[in-house]
Amino acid sequence: MELSNGVISLIPVTSEDFPGFAEIKLLYYRAFQPNERREVSDLVAQMNKPGFTLLMIQMYNMPAGLIALWQLSSFIFIEHIAVTEQLRNKKIGETAINMIADSQDQPILLETAHGTDSFSKSRIEFYKRSGFEIIDDLYEQPAYSKEKTAIKMLLMCNCHIDPDKTKELAAEIHNIVYNQ
């Protein structure tokens, strides 16, 4: 999935030798708490898994962020999205999400932290402005490893999902993304 609107490009990262991967790796560590992310070696290993794509967000050919996503049975799951600190609040993340949504004919789901501080509240509002709604406020992100802990999160979607289907979608995320 390579997408571009002339300013913002979403470029698949296929290996840790990819130009710009060093910047992505640093952003990944800065943007997500240890319990909210994989180890970089595990992230690299995901690049060979069917359905997984790591995208570098570029703005005018400069690394501006990352999106880690999964093509699942009937929806896309955004595991991580982050924009470089100095480029935040310039609609780069919103543009990237809209580019993905416009190129697909499937719902997009993602997890985000409950609004317990100004940063997490801001993130929720960002997703709402991007067309997402909370579909499960009791969702739990499984632990990435034995050394990490599960986290209470919100599960959000960019379209209405029948509440009866939410558990099924969450189970697929847990099974494929988290090997649970």
Image: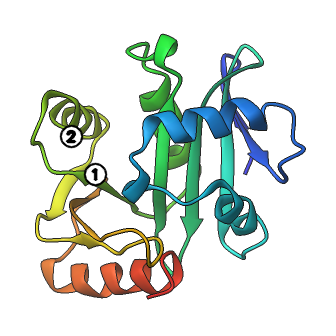
In the image, what residue occupies the spot 66% across and 25% down? 5
| Residue shown at the point (46%, 63%) measured from the top left | 77
Q: Is residue 98 visible?
A: no
> Is label 2 in contact with label 1 (beta carbons under 8 Å)?
yes
Where is residue 72? Give x, y as percent.
53, 76
Q: Judging from the image, what secondary structure is the residue with disc 2 in?
A: helix
Percent x, y of residue 131: 28, 42
Q: Residue furthest front?
A: 147
Circle 2 is placed at which residue position?
124
Query: What is the number of callouts on the image?
Result: 2
The answer to whether 65 appears left or right of 30 in the picture is right
Residue lying furthest right: 17
Seen at 14% across and 78% down, the residue is: 163
**Residue of label 1:** 112
Figure check: 4 above or below 168: above
> How many residues crowd mark 2 within 10 Å: few (<14), some (14–19), many (20+)?
many
